Image: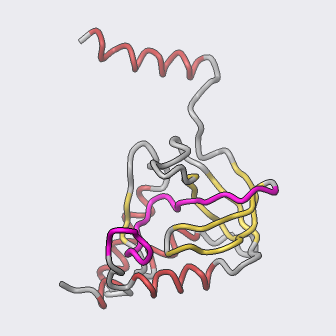
């Protein structure tokens, strides 16, 4: 019981000291270099190439080293490319956990020209399943609603990949 209180106490102390973990309020600007697949993009951020993984979504595989191309994977990649053409200016929001196990920066992407929330649009149009992994849950309610809408309206993979 005592050991379970220690992490909570440390978090409270960090919060009170103004040293909270990285939050979605941290925003960077960048430019699209290349779409790798439906949920992975290379960006230029402050002049450096950075591979990013879109938080909250999981598109079917197209380039996994040990998995075959999955149903609707190529379509998901093409859709993401249509939203994020090379040179597209974007702004990035980060959540609590900064990187995944592949060292990709975990981000929410917003297109500068119209402030489109790219991650959400991909789910809403049926090109991805919702995938939320704690502690990165800032937009959980929006992803749940978009996923339900896409599924109930048989958009994208919800129609093409039954079974």
62 and 28: which is toward the camera: 62
Task: Give the position of the N terminus as an image quadrant.
Answer: top left
Q: Look at the picture and state if 12 lies above or below 129.
A: above
Is 54 left or right of 85, judged from the image as shown? left
Q: Residue at x 44, y 74 (%)?
A: 63
Is 27 left or right of 133, judged from the image as shown? right
Q: Look at the picture and state if 26 lies above or below 69.
A: above
Q: Residue at x 30, y 90 (%)?
A: 160
Q: Position of residue 115 (x, y in %)?
A: 68, 69
| Name of the residue lying farthest toward the right | 47
145 and 42: which is toward the camera: 42
Residue 21 position by quadrant: top right
Task: Give the position of the C terminus as an image quadrant.
Answer: bottom left
| Name of the residue lying farthest toward the left | 163
Q: Total number of numbered labels? A: 0
Is 20 left or right of 90, judged from the image as shown? left
Q: Position of residue 153 (x, y in %)?
A: 33, 86
Residue 132 position by quadrant: bottom left
75 and 101: which is toward the camera: 101
| Name of the residue lying farthest toward the bottom | 160
Q: Position of residue 150 (x, y in %)?
A: 37, 79
Residue 112 position by quadrant: bottom right
Q: Position of residue 92 (x, y in %)?
A: 66, 57
- Magenta-drawn segment: 47-67
Q: Residue at x 36, y 77 (%)?
A: 149
Q: Look at the picture and state if 54 lies above or below 83.
A: above
Asked if the stretch drawn in magenta spans residue 64, the answer is: yes
Asked if the stretch drawn in magenta spans residue 51, the answer is: yes
- The coloring applied to the image is secondary structure
Q: Look at the picture and state if 6 lies above or below 20.
A: above
| Name of the residue lying farthest toward the top | 2
């Amino acid at each position: 019981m005592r050991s379970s209180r220690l992490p909570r106490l440390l978090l409270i102390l960090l919060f009170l000291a103004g040293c909270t973990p990285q939050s979605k309020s941290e925003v960077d600007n960048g430019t699209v270099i290349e779409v790798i697949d439906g949920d992975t993009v290379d960006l230029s951020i402050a002049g450096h190439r950075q591979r990013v993984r879109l938080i909250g979504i999981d598109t079917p595989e197209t380039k996994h080293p040990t998995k075959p191309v999955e149903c609707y994977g190529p379509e998901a990649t093409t859709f993401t490319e249509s939203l994020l053409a090379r040179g597209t200016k974007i702004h990035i929001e980060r959540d609590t956990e900064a990187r995944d196990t592949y060292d990709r920066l975990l981000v929410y992407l917003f297109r500068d020209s119209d402030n489109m929330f790219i991650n959400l649009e991909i789910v809403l149009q049926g090109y991805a399943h919702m995938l939320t992994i704690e502690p990165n849950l800032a937009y959980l309610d929006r992803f749940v609603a978009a996923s339900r809408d896409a599924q109930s309206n048989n958009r994208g993979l919800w129609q093409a990949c039954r079974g």
